[in-house]
């Protein structure tokens, strides 16, 4: 299976609700990053959490990392229609000594209805 | 400062033709990455440069794909004898050093092979 698998694949919520997306991975990592992508083009970096961190906040975003379960979650609070996008988690494996090639999951398509 | 830029934004070519895709990383970033993203999938790693050298090209699918970064800044991804299966969005990213740094992505080049 692929490193960095997100679930659910698709999530539809109402504006103002919270959205939670999960990511699982298989190998030991240095860090895990969450990205957002609109309309299949460039990815926007949201947050990076290192393997020795358990939780991180940035504005309305909250990311958790559980290295024992090899999983992470992204919580978006008080969602807005503008949050509609695809969200990807990406990991870089500890074994990658020649740089941090990222391995992405297939993403979660979030739709926030006005 | 300016982000990662990629040109062209769209490229339509015929099967068998040669194409070049260009990436301008963020100024001062020594690490540069190429990824490829097919519809509905997450990005897949192709190649990583540290300075002028390709530190990891294990993601290139076959020998029709080649990339250069002669002066350690701009990079060109070259695809020979294009095939319809090469159609995808090609994404470039750069990071300050590599090795666990945040990767910043460009808007991508959408390649369509007819």
Image: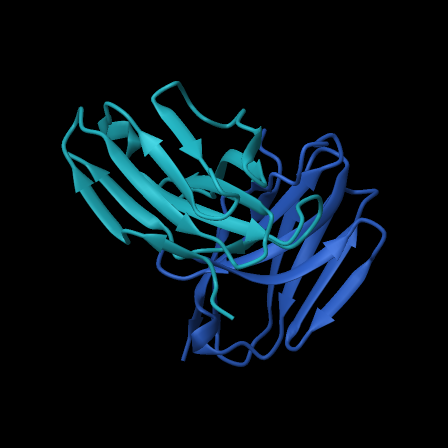
Chain colours: A blue, B cyan
Task: Residue B76: name its quadrant.
Answer: top left
Taking A16 as reference, is B83 above or below it? above
Task: Residue A75: name its quadrant.
Answer: bottom right
Q: Nearer the viewer, residue A82 or A69?
A: A82
At a point 73% along the width and 33% down the height, the residue shown is: A27
Measuring from the top left, give residue B66's x and y in whole percent.
Answer: 40, 28
At a point 60% along the width and 48% down the height, the residue shown is: B30
Taking A2 as reference, is A31 above or below it? below
Measuring from the top left, give residue A89's x and y in whole percent.
Answer: 60, 50
Residue lying farthest to the top in this orientation? B63
Using residue A93 as the reference point, say whether residue A109 is left or right of it: left
Residue A72 is at least partly visible in this image: yes
Measuring from the top left, give residue B108's x and y in whole percent.
Answer: 37, 51
At a point 31% along the width and 29% down the height, the residue shown is: B79
Using residue B82 as the reference point, say whether residue A97 is left or right of it: right
Residue A8 is at least partly visible in this image: no
Report the quarter where the N terminus of chain A lies.
top right
Q: Nearer the viewer, residue B105 or B4?
A: B4
Taking B1 as reference, is A114 above or below it? below
């Amino acid at each position: 299976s692929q490193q960095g698998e997100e679930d659910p694949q698709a999530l539809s919520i109402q504006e103002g609700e919270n959205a939670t997306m999960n990511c699982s991975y298989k190998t030991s990592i240095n860090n895990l990053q969450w990205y957002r992508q609109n309309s299949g083009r460039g990815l926007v970096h949201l947050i990076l959490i290192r393997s020795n961190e358990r939780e991180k906040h940035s504005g309305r975003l909250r990311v958790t990392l559980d290295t024992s379960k090899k999983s992470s979650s992204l919580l978006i609070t008080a969602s807005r229609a503008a949050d509609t996008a695809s969200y990807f988690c990406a990991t870089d494996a500890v074994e990658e000594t020649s740089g941090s090639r990222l391995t992405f999951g297939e993403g979660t398509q979030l739709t926030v209805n006005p | 400062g300016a982000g990662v830029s990629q040109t062209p934004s769209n490229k339509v070519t015929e099967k068998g033709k040669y194409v070049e895709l260009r990436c301008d990383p963020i100024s001062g970033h020594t690490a540069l990455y190429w990824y490829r993203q097919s519809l509905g999938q997450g990005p897949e790693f192709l190649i990583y440069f540290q300075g002028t050298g390709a530190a990891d090209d294990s993601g290139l699918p076959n020998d029709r794909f080649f990339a250069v970064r002669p002066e350690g800044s701009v990079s060109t991804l070259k695809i020979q004898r294009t095939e319809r299966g090469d159609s995808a969005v090609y994404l470039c990213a750069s990071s300050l050093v590599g090795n666990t740094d945040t990767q910043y992505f460009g808007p991508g080049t959408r390649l369509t092979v007819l």
